[in-house]
Image (cartoon, coloured by chain):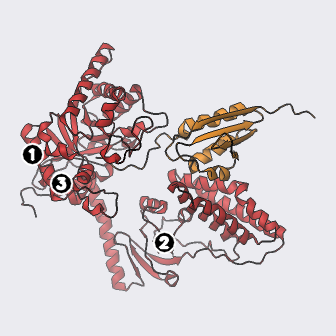
Chain colours: A red, B orange
Amino acid sequence: MADGVVTVLRAVERPRRKAGTPAQEAAALKDALEQALAEIEALARGAICDASDMLGFQAAMLSDDELSRPAFESISAGESASAAWDAAMAVEIAGYRDSQDAYFSARAADLEDIRDRVLGHLAPAADGALIPGGSVVVATDLPLSRFLGIDWETGGAIVLTEGSPTSHVAMLARARRVPMVVGLGAAADWMSGREALVDAASGEVVLDPTEDTRNAFAARAGRAKAAAAATTAFRERPAVTKDGTAISVNLNAASAEELEGIDPAICDGIGLVRTELMFYGAGGPPDEEAQYEAYRRIVAWAQGRPVTIRTLDAGGDKPIEGVTMSGESNPFLGVRGIRLSLRHPVLFQTQLRALARGAVHGDLRVMLPMVTVPEELEAARALLDEAMTSLASDRIPAARPKLGIMIEVPAAAIGVDLFDADFFSIGSNDLTQYVTAAGRDIGAVADLADPLNPAVLRLIASVARHGRESGREVSLCGDAGGEPRAISALLRAGLRSLSVAPQSVAAAKQAIAAVDLREATP
Amino acid sequence: MKDETAAEQATDHTELTNAVGLHARPSVKLTQLAKTFDCRVEIALSVDGPWVDAKSPVKVMRVKAPRGAVLYVRASGKNARAAAAALVGLVRDGFGEAMDQPADQSHG
């Protein structure tokens, strides 16, 4: 939420400036290019990761004579600097926009950013006026380099009449907690200089607020801040419902790097380690030593807490060179997860050996993804036995880890009693998609892919019941476990263990504390 | 005056295996590496060209080589063999992008 004065960023004007002599125009363009490059390099010095890469790209393009060559040619033919530059960039940009590849066509926006920055230096009235700290910046869209050039420390907000919630700028604004509203749709100019209240959570922008509105807003902002602090307080506490039922809260992770700086005391263990990310590296699948080292480090981080590691979960939609199938008509229903591993027994053995070696260092458990029939579990178990035998004959220390399965294929959920697994973890993301036959990344049907659909909850409840009756632990590692609105339903369905992303721990524990299992479902 | 460094030539090729091909970040790395060599360095998508200057990020980006494309490298002049080998090595190393995986859809 933010309260500030509106500064409207106008689209850079393209003045039909009269051309001076070719020498004058060439000098003007050269100066503008140098200034633009210096600005980008200054911004790049303060940037990290994605922002740094993007600025590095812009700097590399701006330093390349090839970019401005066509413009200088037009200038020597009598064009003005801005017209020449604009036209040359239009050609370059069109080349990117026309690309079939989404990544390359997205770079057109970066080139437009470069074009406008240089045009800004050529325009007689500099558009790059300083934006006062704490401003509510209103624009059609906001190029990334412009965002980075504004000091957000003193507050402020972004209001875009167009823009996208998934753009690079949106990601950075989110990370830096700068309130941002996109798609406002209205014209902007008349807003200049007026006071604006921006509530990015609700998408509201209020102009020229009355005293009452402003006070109510400030009160809301104060409450939001206090609520955030209250949530954080839950992070370190054990997770207990209102009626005193203890809930096991575990973490989803992919690497030891991700866990660095996180105190293991905030969780009861690691409920899911996604190993496939190790397999996407440039060098191909990691060897046994590299995997063992990775597993060992994660187990060490957990300081005695259980660590559940999922075997390779890749498929046509998450391809690995030389391993996954290509050309499947529907990779989501194809050779993935355990199906893939069983087709690559050497690869699978390597992973199982590394896991058994890692199990020497702590409570390491192995979990199989995408299991559909009991035969898959038995085949994996036989391979794990082989791994133990071969490690013993190699005289390499190893321990036999517990072997459990993901419940995500509906067949496994409905027939859970047919599986002789040591434990079960419900993969609510895929279970929901398969049960509702709706893709959560397909906008038109995403609403149907709801983990709180009664059919999905019934399956979860029956898996939880089977776990209780057969004395096996049942957990849930999908996104729903970390969603406060879903937690009550999941606990009432009988789950007593969840695995969530580290940043969701506090909110999850807070939601758990609000649930009273003695009460009938509201 | 006779040019002592009579054209040392080298050509090599390799497949682009990183997730997004010759996009912004790899292009910048490629051109930076090419610039460390004095000789002429060029790339192309086929052995017949068209060959573009590997030291120009703008020209390299225009190639828009996707993942799976075979990238040809040609160098001529001083240390041409080393230059070609270095560029091919960079591509084979996935441009040093270790975790170049597709955007993660949490699979759970």
Q: Residues within 10 Å of mark 3 (few under 14, many from 20)?
A: many
Residue B17 x %, y %: 52, 40
The residue that label 1 is drawn on is: A465
Residue A287 x %, y %: 41, 27
* Residue at x 33%, y 49% (from the top left corner): B106
Is disc 2 in contact with disc 3, using a CB cutoff of under 8 Å?
no
Q: Quadrant of residue A199 in the image?
A: bottom left
* Residue at x 66%, y 45% (from the top left corner): B31
What mark, if any, has residue A134 been given in the picture? 2
Q: Does A227 sit above or below residue A269?
A: below
Query: Viewed as shown, does residue B25 lie left or right of A22?
Result: left
Chain of the residue on which disc 3 is drawn: A
Label 2 sits on a secondary structure element that is loop
Split into 4 quadrants, where in the image is the C terminus of chain A? bottom left
Chain of the residue on which disc 2 is drawn: A
The residue that label 3 is drawn on is: A456
Please state which amino acid type lies under the numbered disc 2.
Gly
